[in-house]
Amino acid sequence: MELKGEFEVESDRNTVSSFMSNIDKVTSIIPDIQSMEKINDTSARLVVKAGQSAIKGKFTLLFEIKKKDDGGGVEISAKGSGATGSLNLKADYAFTDSPNGTTSVKWLVNITIGGVIATMGSRVINSTAEKYILVLTDSFRKSFEK
């Protein structure tokens, strides 16, 4: 499943890039984290509660951030599993300066789901994933509001 979008952040590109390259800051905006074990400056092991109704569950994920060389974005990956299935997420965030001093953030997320949750039907899974990504996007944007 692929989800994509774009939004503006009220901050300069370097500040946005610095925030999204910091494992502590990025994980602070992820909803429903049950625990976090920092492995190093770019990766952590997370236990995250996710889903809705019959497809709720906890997932243990290896979460990694890779900063692009030019400061123009980051790649984030999360791989892991839980009692209801497996999750493989790859997110690409691209940052560009906007004329009004803000930063435009374009994002593309690819999610592969397996196990019991994958049998629930694509409409339910897509809806749940989209809601979760939109909550993350809103949390990210609010981190820069003054």
Image (cartoon, rainbow, N blue to C red):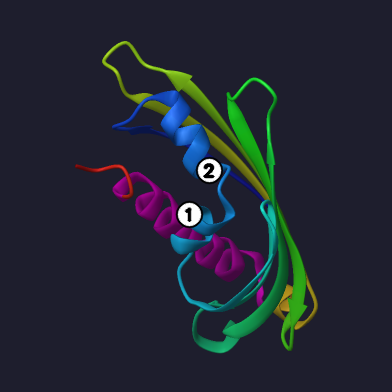
Circle 1 is placed at which residue position? Answer: 25
Q: Are marks 2 and 1 in contact (CB under 8 Å)?
A: yes
Residue displayed at 72% across by 85% down: 84
Mark 2 → mark 1, Cα distance in angstroms: 7 Å
Q: Is residue 128 above or below residue 3?
A: below
Asked if 75 appears above or below 12 in the picture, the reply is below
Q: Characterize the magenta stretch by its predominant secondary structure.
A: helix
Residue 23 can be seen, yes or no: yes
Image coordinates of residue 133 in percent, x first then y, are 50, 56
Q: Secondary structure at mark 2?
A: helix
The amino acid marked with disc number 1 is Lys
Q: Quadrant of residue 129?
A: bottom right
- The residue identified by callout 2 is 20
Q: Is residue 87 visible?
A: no
The magenta segment is: 120-142
- The quarter holding residue 44 reads bottom right
Left or right of 143? Residue 76 is right
Is residue 50 inside the magenta stretch? no
Q: Residue at x 80, y 78 (%)?
A: 115
Residue at image coords 19%, 42%: 146
Q: For the residue labelled by badge 1, is the local secondary structure a helix, a strand or a loop?
A: helix
Where does the image place residue 136, in percent across and percent down from the top left?
A: 45, 56
Q: What's under tag 2, amino acid-wise?
A: Met
